[in-house]
Image: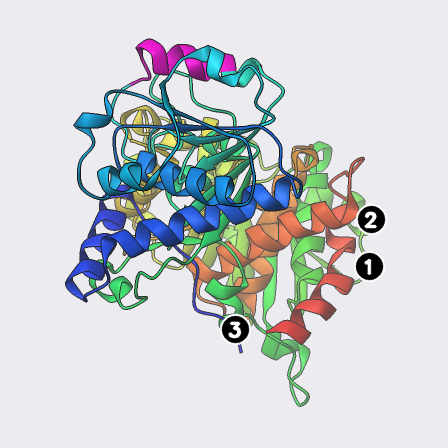
Amino acid sequence: MLEPPHEIITVAEMYAADRFAAEQGVPTLSLMEYAGRAVTDEVLRLKPKPCPVAVLCGPGNNGGDGFVVARLLKARGWPVTVALLGERAHLKGDAAVNAGRWDGEIVPLAPDVLNDAEVVVDALYGAGLSRPLEGVARATVIALNASAADVVAVDVPSGLHGDLGRSLDGLCVAADVTVTFFRLKPAHVLMPGRIACGHVVLEQIGIPDAALEKIAPKIFVNGKRLWGRAYPKPEPLAHKYARGHAVVVSGPAHATGAARLAARGALRIGAGLVSVASPREAVEINAAHLTAIMVKPFEGSAGLADLLRDKRLNVVAIGPGCGVGEATKDLVAVALNKQCVLDADALTSFQGDPAYLFRKLHPGTVLTPHEGEFERLFPSLLTKSSNRIEAARAAAAEAGCVVLLKGPDTVVAVPDGRVSVATNAPPWLATAGSGDVLTGFILGLLAQHMEPFLAASAAVWMHGLAAMHFGPGLIAEDLPEQLPALLRRLYEEI
């Protein structure tokens, strides 16, 4: 039995969850106490034996969490220095209460409070910080990032905006561990924020899960909890035709490798049959390299239309190696009569008139642009959007289909507002042809009748997992070959 999907909530949604907890009678002081205990536990995991620790407290509730940590560590015999940004008399609410429970000295925040610290607890600012770091806070963070101390951040590293996934001016704390509460925020999964957070620990502090019913979040960490129940598994009485027949449209003779990579990806991930639709000039080279994958000749858009009239061919991928131009645009128009994955040249060919493409798209389509291709179809949308999540969501609404924005934090969005964000892609996945394999993975899951948003999300996750399983030195051809072992494990878990 899988756990519920792992939701990601915005800063505003987190505030709503806090309010909901208070309305349900959960004392806010208890939430702060549990948060401080969770951070303390991570400090103790990081350093089992007492050592000098500096707790940097800000003027809000994050600072209140810091006072709890300081009190709990001191009770365990740790030498604790508490440094406060601002005046103690200006603290309010629960932060003021916990400052009152601290029986040690409070020194003004300054870079020199870091001098002897082996561990620093960053409790300066939380996810809702709306301005760049400045003054003594800025100077202290610069010194902290230059120090050798281990850093445990509360909620998010100070200076990192919880929704944007980045700092407002390029400066934030570089944490080794970040402890956050209830649900992850966009900053914990989007680059470069994810790097600044270090290892992210999610803790439950007493906010009822029922808060999610009121919030109704639509952003999810990409993983089995999102799509596991929908993932297709071979049935004992099924046959290959029940698992779909996927078609990958090949480019000309000098550019056929990309289509074959996609085709092998589709076959390995479980499509019952896969064919490469090949221009006649490329039939010989495609046939020479393929065995379990069939080769089907065609000539131009009319020939592809004739080929796709076969209802058994239920999904099509087009773009890898096809070339940019009118001929590809004509082929795309034909391919869109089926469920379709559009990648690479199939996207760039519409750079001059993306609206023409959007009019032909349908909910069974998946677009898979990297940032350059995304800009060609959705000019300036990335720069106008607050983050990649909002850019992909807006693009999906405009295109009327699933949009998969590739990157180290690949985002999959659907017009109804659902979004998944992948966090499992290793850096060695950035290699020629890996995107073509991803196209094949998506195609193979669509062939098996998986819903497009979940198919695209599952394919992205399996793609990252395959790269991680292989390790450094990966090339695109290695990716499909990791799937047998990974699928065996997946089928046991879902």
Taking the spot 52% from the left edge, 73% from the top edge, the residue there is 2
Q: Is residue 338 visible?
A: no
Q: Is residue 13 visible?
A: yes
Residue 71 place in picture, x, y as percent: 42, 41
* Residues at marks 1 and 2, CA–CA distance in whole angstroms: 7 Å
Quadrant hosting residue 44: top right
Amino acid type at image mark 1: Thr
* Residues at marks 1 and 3, CA–CA distance in whole angstroms: 37 Å
- Residue of label 1: 291
For residue 2, which numbered disc appears in the image? Answer: 3
Q: Please tell me whether residue 135 belongs to the stretch shown in magenta.
A: yes
For residue 467, which numbered disc appears in the image? Answer: none
User: SS class of the residue under badge 2?
Assistant: helix
Amino acid type at image mark 2: His
Residue 411 in the image: above or below residue 457: above
How many numbered badges does the structure rendering display? 3
For residue 289, which numbered disc appears in the image? Answer: 2
* Residues at marks 3 and 2, CA–CA distance in whole angstroms: 40 Å
Q: Which residues are magenta?
A: 132-143
Mark 1, residues whose alpha carbon is within 10 Å: few (<14), some, or many (≥20)?
A: few
Looking at the rendered image, the disc whose residue lies closer to the viewer, 1 or 3, is: 3
Amino acid type at image mark 3: Leu
Quadrant hosting residue 356: top left
| Marked residue nearer the N-terminal end (1 or 3) | 3
Residue 143 in the image: above or below residue 420: above
Residue 472 in the image: above or below residue 180: above
Main secondary-structure element of the magenta-colored stretch: helix
